[in-house]
Image (tube, helix red, strand yellow):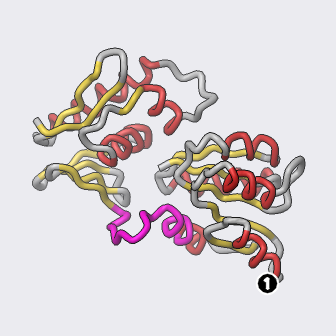
């Protein structure tokens, strides 16, 4: 799952990014409103943590522009302001939730989980399942019928994309954008290496699923 953090306090932004990465999220970080708006308008993210007070373009302006352009990415506003009018204004601009600084890590993560939860659907956010194959976020592992194998962070993130979009071809470009960022200079052979690792781990646990290659396009997770 890919998140965007837009926060001009660099130390806080980097700390947020590190907390989220440790909790298995893929994160891009921007330190000003202009760059933050450019990233937000791509529609690439599963959720955005957006400060209100930003240089160049404030968070509410970014939020209004997103909603005007029909970018529906969920947004958590993050600000030092605690006045009720500010909260109302932010929510009226299209924010999905509001968190006032300072905050505790547990509350931030709970609000991010709520932010990215599929509307109207009760799901177990610690795991994803496909054809008996289970991806466990808490243990960063892949299992099938009692057999389990540990995954690296990148392996986990790629498998999360595949298992969350079963039987669909995921273009290599989308995988790079989601995992490494849309401005990344990562090459396709990086993906191929991780796909090879994942195939070996699927084989190691005898999972009845495979990652198929659509030559020149991308990959899909399917039943054998």
Residue linked to disc 1: 84
Which part of the image, by quadrant, shows the C terminus?
Answer: top left
* 124 is within the stretch colored magenta: yes
Can you give x and y, in whole percent of width and height, for residue 121 in the image?
A: 36, 69
| Vertical position of residue 75 compared to residue 213: above or below | below
Residue occupying image coordinates x 36% and y 21%: 217
| Vertical position of residue 158 compared to residue 183: above or below | below
Q: Which quadrant would residue 172 be assigned to in this image?
A: top left
Can you give x and y, in whole percent of width and height, for residue 192 in the image?
A: 36, 22
| Vertical position of residue 14 compared to residue 180: above or below | below
| Vertical position of residue 133 compared to residue 213: above or below | below
User: Nearest the camera: 143 or 165?
Assistant: 165
Count every numbered label the image shows and give the total.
1
SS at mark 1? helix
User: Nearest the camera: 65 or 167?
Assistant: 65
- Magenta residues span 110-126
Residue occupying image coordinates x 19% and y 37%: 222
Residue 126 relative to residue 108: left or right: left
Can you give x and y, in whole percent of width and height, for residue 150 in the image?
A: 30, 46
Residue occupying image coordinates x 45% and y 65%: 117
Residue 216 relative to residue 82: left or right: left
Residue 115 relative to residue 90: left or right: left
Q: Residue furthest right?
A: 56
User: Nearest the camera: 203 or 92?
Assistant: 92
Can you give x and y, in whole percent of width and height, for residue 40 in the image?
A: 66, 46
């Amino acid at each position: 799952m890919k998140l965007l953090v837009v926060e001009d306090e660099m130390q806080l932004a980097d700390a947020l990014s590190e907390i989220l990465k440790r909790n298995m999220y893929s994160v891009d970080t921007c330190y000003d409103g202009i760059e933050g708006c450019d990233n937000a308008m791509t529609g690439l993210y599963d959720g955005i943590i957006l400060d209100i007070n930003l240089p160049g373009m404030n968070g509410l302006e970014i939020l209004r522009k997103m909603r005007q352009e029909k970018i529906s990415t969920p947004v958590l506003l993050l600000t030092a302001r605690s006045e009720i009018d500010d909260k109302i204004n932010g929510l009226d601009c299209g924010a999905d939730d509001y968190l006032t600084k300072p905050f505790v890590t547990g509350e931030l993560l709970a609000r991010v989980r709520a932010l990215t939860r599929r509307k109207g659907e009760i799901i177990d956010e610690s795991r994803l399942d496909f054809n008996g194959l289970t991806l466990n976020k808490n243990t960063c592992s892949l299992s099938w019928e009692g057999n389990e194998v540990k995954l690296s962070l990148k392996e986990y993130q790629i498998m999360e994309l595949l298992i969350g979009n079963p039987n669909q071809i995921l273009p290599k470009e989308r995988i790079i954008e989601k995992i490494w960022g849309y401005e990344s200079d990562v090459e396709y052979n990086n993906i191929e290496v991780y796909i090879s690792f994942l195939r070996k781990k699927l084989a190691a646990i005898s999972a009845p699923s495979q990652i198929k290659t659509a030559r020149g396009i991308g990959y899909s997770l399917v039943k054998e």
